[in-house]
Amino acid sequence: MSPTSYSLSDFNFDLPPELIAQTPLPERSASRLLQVDGAQLHDRHFSDLVDQLHAGDVLVFNDTRVLKARFFGVKNTGGKVEVLVERVLFNDPDQRSVLAQIRASKSPAQGSTIRLADAFEVEVGERQGEFYVLNFPSDVFDLLEQFGSLPLPPYIEHSADEFDENRYQTVYSKVPGAVAAPTAGLHFDEAILEKCRAKGIQFAYVTLHVGAGTFQPVRHEDLSQHDMHSEWYNMPEATVAAIQTARANGRDVIAVGTTSLRALESASQSGQLLAGNADTRLFITPGYQFKTVTRLVTNFHLPKSTLLMLVSAFAGYNHIRAAYQHAIAQRYRFFSYGDAMLLTNKFYE
């Protein structure tokens, strides 16, 4: 099957609802790990990951930190609204402006105000597609942390509590800006990280602020018609240097999560990995030739999602179909709080 032959329905599958993990396991590294090497499938525990890596390999982590980005509020006309901050606008030197989704019975007018969390008011700015610019009265990050709530994914049926506030962040999260966690990283705890260090596995970091668009299904059967959501990333010089060393020594570059992979591949579009920061709309589907990443740690993804297309491109469409069928039969836990996979990059087939 050629790349252009794939359509949206090729990435659908039936998932029993009870396999959607609603809560994390008590221990981060207690998850299962399905290793996919071509047509070979290996059922492992996540703690076995260290045994599958080698000294000199580079694990690339996304160090973004999830914002408390959800608010409930009231328009100045009295109507109730729900606000989900999509991204902080860093071109505002005072860090007082955001792009946000607004759910309301009637769209708010530009120049109107919304009172959030019964604590402060924001002014509605211009509309940009499905988002609105909202102007906060003071530093956005302070107000989010004080009054916002953690935006769990739409398929998780409970509101975030204190346990979620810890477990829906990676242990190495550092740079606030995401509205969804880079969930492959949720399996790593300090014990696993220390075992990796002791084995000589190198660590490198990127920042990609995951947007709510990561949960949006593709709606066009013709994949070329899909408008990919935009996400901001930063590629540090130190990460570029670590990867160059690994590749020169024939070692693997292992992206921890599809977000790390998107950042690495976005920064490699010239043919070589370049440091810097930018917005990316990179849409990876079967047929894409990977330029930097050789292995991938990832969770199980939603049907008809861009992430399922990405892993199909990475490991091979038929191999991913078989792996997902196996995972369902073996009762793996799916999505953000679910189990993990370790994939090896294969040429498109």
Image (cartoon, rainbow, N blue to C red):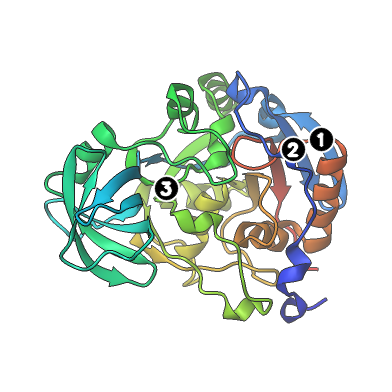
Specify the quadrant of the image occupied by residue 267. Answer: bottom left
Mark 1 falls on what kind of element?
A: loop
Q: Please name which of the two marks, 1 or 3, marks the residue nearer to the observer.
A: 1
Mark 3 falls on what kind of element?
A: strand
Q: Earlier in the sequence, mark 3 or mark 2?
A: 2
**Callout 3 touching callout 2 (CB < 8 Å):** no
Specify the quadrant of the image occupied by residue 79. Answer: bottom left
- Compare residues 81 and 227 and report the one nearer the observer: 81
Specify the quadrant of the image occupied by residue 174. Answer: top left
Q: Could you tell me the amino acid type at mark 2?
A: Leu
Badge 2 is on which residue?
A: 19
Instruction: Give the image location of residue 276, x and y in percent.
Output: 33, 59
Instruction: Judge from the rendering whether residue 333 lies leftward or rightward of residue 62; answer left or right.
Output: right
Badge 1 is on which residue?
A: 331
Mark linked to residue 206: 3
Q: Earlier in the sequence, mark 1 or mark 3?
A: 3
Q: Could you tell me the amino acid type at mark 3?
A: Val
**Callout 1 touching callout 2 (CB < 8 Å):** yes
Give the residue drawn at x 48%, y 42%. 181
- Distance (Cα) linking label 1 and label 3: 32 Å
Mark 2 falls on what kind of element?
A: helix
Q: Please name which of the two marks, 3 or 2, marks the residue nearer to the observer.
A: 2
Above or below for 219 versus 199: below
Give the residue drawn at x 48%, y 33%. 159
Q: Residue furthest front?
A: 78
Q: Is residue 201 visible?
A: no
Above or below for 245 versus 144: below
